[in-house]
Image (cartoon, rainbow, N blue to C red):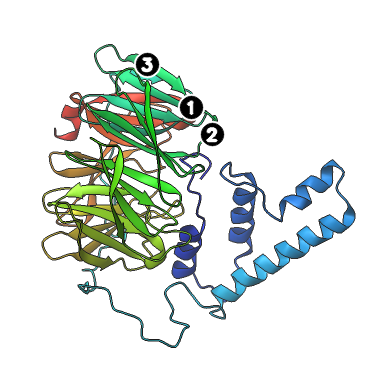
């Protein structure tokens, strides 16, 4: 997670692992890796196991023993989950009937395993330019402008005419807690997880316009023609903002409150779509009436906590940081129709010619076929590209974050069929 925007909620990653593995014995290497990543991930605040690390700086032996005991309990719980001794997410422990999702989604048509359908050979496409940006995390566009948010708390606008940074502002505090951004010609919007606020900026100068108090831990943000939509991760809701008044026009409950609630958003087929990890579903909301139109269960081991994209015939959602899977939904039937293995972790999509492109962490950019449910085209953008970054289509190009190299690549859109 450290090389990507801060996820904040680790529950979706653990749920994905629990659903996929359930080994006969404790997966020691996986537990060690997960614990190591947890200890170093920058989104963490203060947790009991920090006592162990503080002990190296003069903490008491009693504190170190307490920290070690806590770690032992955490590992025991993980092993118990794998062995089926602990209630898994979604199990009903209240004794009351669990309401079924509406409308019910049929089982997805089986997708061929990655080993059965090998990826096509990669086509090398040299970038038009590589623009240096320190610590890029998130990229957004309205089709012409390109905005970035960085790990150092910088909000940046790139001018596609000059291929250079045209405006930049340092947000305070300088943190990666600014989860998401989206904009158009009337405003650029940024969610601030820590302060439960939505920040509005002038899209060209990046001058601060206003700050709006939101629900509980706002994360995904989406700008449409008449509204701004916010996913409240721990508030179990999606909020609609009127950009004319900068006020909350509607709060729409979409799932349970608490960790791992609504994450990211997309617009398509006259609806707003939001992924909700703690209910294992994607919720469809009417863009005009704000009513919930469908709740679509996402079958494991995929998990609905990644980026979404909408085409004319399909809705796409990636899984959590620990997963390689993309789920395809048919908006005509509100049913899951396929699950695709990217071969690496991917996060957000760019739609080009009604087809989704995404960059997995294996250093490529791939296209998914909505009919065969497989990767059918692979682009390798020059040398030294690590992959795994956000992608957007803007100003006749595809733009992709190459975070490991502290740069943003611009590639000719003709290579992607656009």
Instruction: Name the spot of residue 304 as percent of width and height, x first.
Output: 35, 58
State left or right for residue 261 relative to residue 254. right
Q: Residue at x 70, y 68 (%)?
A: 73
Question: Is the C-beta separation of discs 2 and 1 under 8 Å?
Answer: yes
Q: Position of residue 240 (x, y in %)?
A: 27, 48
Residue most toward the top? 162
Residue in front for this viewpoint, 171 or 356: 171
Q: Is residue 348 visible?
A: no
Image quadrant for the C terminus? top left
**3D distance between C-alphas at marks 2 and 1:** 8 Å
Residue that carries the numbered disc 3 in the rendered image = 167
- Mark 3–mark 2 Cα distance, whole angstroms, equals 19 Å
Mark 3 vs mark 1: in front: 1
Residue 394 image position (x, y, % from top left): 22, 28
Residue picked out by circle 1: 171
Foreground of the two, 126 or 360: 360
The quadrant where residue 104 appears: bottom left
Instruction: Find numbered disc 2 in the image and state the secondary structure of the residue it sits on.
Output: loop
Q: Badge 2 local density, few (<14 within 10 Å), some, or many (20+)?
A: some
- What residue appears at the point 50 percent right and 42 percent down from the top-left corner? 195
Residue that numbered label 2 is attached to: 175
- Does 101 sit above or below residue 220? below
Classify 365 as above or below 156.
below
The image shows residue 152 at horizontal and vertical percentages of 52, 28
Mark 1: few/some/many CA within 10 Å (<14, 14-19, 20+): some
Q: Residue at x 29, y 53 (%)?
A: 317
**Circle count:** 3
């Amino acid at each position: 997670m450290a090389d990507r925007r801060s996820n904040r909620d680790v529950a979706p990653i653990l749920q994905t692992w629990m659903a996929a593995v359930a080994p006969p014995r404790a997966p020691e290497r996986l537990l060690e890796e997960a614990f190591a990543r947890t200890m170093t991930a920058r989104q963490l605040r203060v947790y009991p196991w920090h006592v162990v690390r503080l002990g190296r700086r003069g903490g008491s032996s009693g504190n170190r023993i307490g920290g070690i005991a806590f770690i032992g309990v955490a590992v025991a719980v993980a092993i118990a989950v794998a062995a089926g001794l602990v209630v898994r997410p979604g199990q009903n422990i209240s004794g009351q009937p669990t309401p079924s999702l509406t409308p019910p989604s049929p089982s997805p048509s089986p997708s061929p395993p990655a080993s059965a359908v090998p990826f096509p050979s990669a086509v090398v496409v040299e970038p038009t330019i590589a623009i240096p940006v320190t610590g890029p995390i998130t990229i957004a566009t309205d089709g012409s402008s390109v905005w970035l948010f960085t790990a150092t708390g910088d909000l940046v606008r790139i001018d596609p005419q000059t291929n250079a940074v045209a405006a930049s502002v340092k947000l305070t505090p300088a943190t990666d807690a600014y989860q998401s951004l989206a904009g158009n010609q009337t405003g650029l919007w940024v969610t601030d997880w820590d302060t439960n606020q939505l920040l509005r900026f002038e899209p060209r100068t990046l001058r601060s316009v206003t700050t709006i108090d939101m629900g509980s831990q706002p994360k995904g943000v989406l700008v449409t023609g008449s509204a701004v939509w916010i996913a409240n991760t721990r508030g179990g809701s999606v909020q609609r903002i009127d950009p004319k008044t900068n006020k909350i026009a509607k709060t729409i409950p979409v799932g349970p409150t608490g960790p791992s609630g609504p994450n990211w958003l997309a617009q398509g087929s006259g609806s707003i779509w939001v992924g909700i990890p703690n209910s294992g579903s994607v919720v469809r909301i009417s863009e005009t009436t704000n009513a919930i139109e469908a709740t679509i269960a996402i079958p494991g081991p995929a998990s609905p906590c990644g980026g979404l994209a909408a085409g004319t015939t399909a809705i796409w959602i990636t899984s959590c940081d620990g997963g390689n899977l993309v789920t395809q939904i048919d908006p005509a039937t509100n049913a899951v129709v396929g699950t695709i293995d990217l071969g690496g972790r991917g996060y957000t999509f760019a739609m080009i010619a009604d087809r989704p492109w995404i960059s997995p962490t294996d250093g490529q950019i791939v296209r998914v076929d909505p009919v065969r449910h497989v990767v059918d085209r692979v682009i390798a953008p020059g040398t030294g590209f690590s992959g795994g970054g956000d992608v957007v289509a803007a100003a006749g190009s595809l733009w992709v974050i190459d975070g490991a190299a502290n740069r943003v690549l611009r590639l000719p859109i003709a290579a992607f069929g656009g």
